[in-house]
Each structure stands twice: as C-alpha cells, then as structure tokens.
Amino acid sequence: MSTPQKTSKAFLEEMEQDEKISYSNVYDDIYRKLVQHGVPAEEIAYIHDAASDAKKKELFSKVRQGTIRILIGSTAKMGAGTNVQDK
C-alpha cells in the first residue's frame, strides 16, 4: 500500500496546516486516524524515521521507555514479528 514519503514529524506539520489531506499511503492514513482519535502525535513514529542502525536503536529505546507508544513499519524495514520490548 506504499511507504511514507516523509517522516512522521513532517507529516504532522503538513496535517496541522491542512485538515483535508487526501489519502497518500497507508502509513500516513493510520497516523492521521490515530491522531484524530486522540493519540498524541509525539507518541507515534515510523520505522522509516530511523535511517541508520544507531537511529533505530535510539527509536527502539524510546519505545521501551514508553515515549513512543506506536511504531509503524513494514516487514521489509522492521522484520516479521519485531518485538522491541524487553519483557
């Protein structure tokens, strides 16, 4: 269903400017719906936001800390059944 062309942060900025964003890809559609239903935008991230192994490690750490509650990614980017939780 396509991958995001922007980071989640860039999409949020665009969403704040225009409430009538048309469907572009499944990632942004899920993101938009989560925000519209009350999930704080800063608690949602795309695996695509982490371009390097170091950034991915940092992102996974934020998930473990609870700073990021929802991590959206494809099997190709995250792997099948990726579990970043310690428990």
Image (cartoon, rainbow, N blue to C red):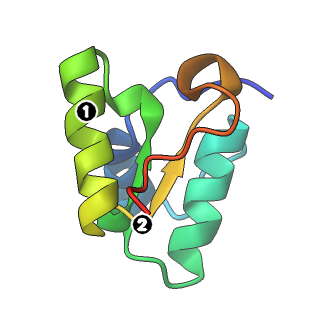
Q: Residue furthest right?
A: 1
Separation of disc 1 and disc 2 at Cα? 15 Å
x and y, in percent, of residue 76 in the image: 65, 17
Q: Is residue 73 visible?
A: yes
Quadrant hosting residue 32: bottom right
Give the residue type at disc 2.
Arg
Residue visible at 66% across and 56% down? 30
Please name which of the two marks, 1 or 2, marks the residue nearer to the observer.
Answer: 1
Residue 35 appears left or right of 26: left
Quadrant hosting residue 52: top left
Residue pointed to by mark 1: 57
Q: Are marks 1 and 2 in contact (CB under 8 Å)?
A: no
Quadrant of the snapshot with the C terminus? bottom left
Residue visible at 44% across and 47% down? 84
Marker disc for residue 2:
none
x and y, in percent, of residue 53 in the image: 27, 17
Residue 16 appears left or right of 67: right
Give the residue type at disc 1.
Lys
Label 2 Cα crowd, 10 Å radius (few <14 / some 14-19 / many 20+)? some
x and y, in percent, of residue 79 in the image: 62, 25
Under circle 2, the secondary element is loop
x and y, in percent, of residue 21 in the image: 60, 51
- In depth, the one of 10 and 56 nearer the eye is 56
Residue pointed to by mark 2: 69
Asked if residue 68 is positioned above or below residue 52 in the image, the reply reads below
Q: Is residue 67 visible?
A: no
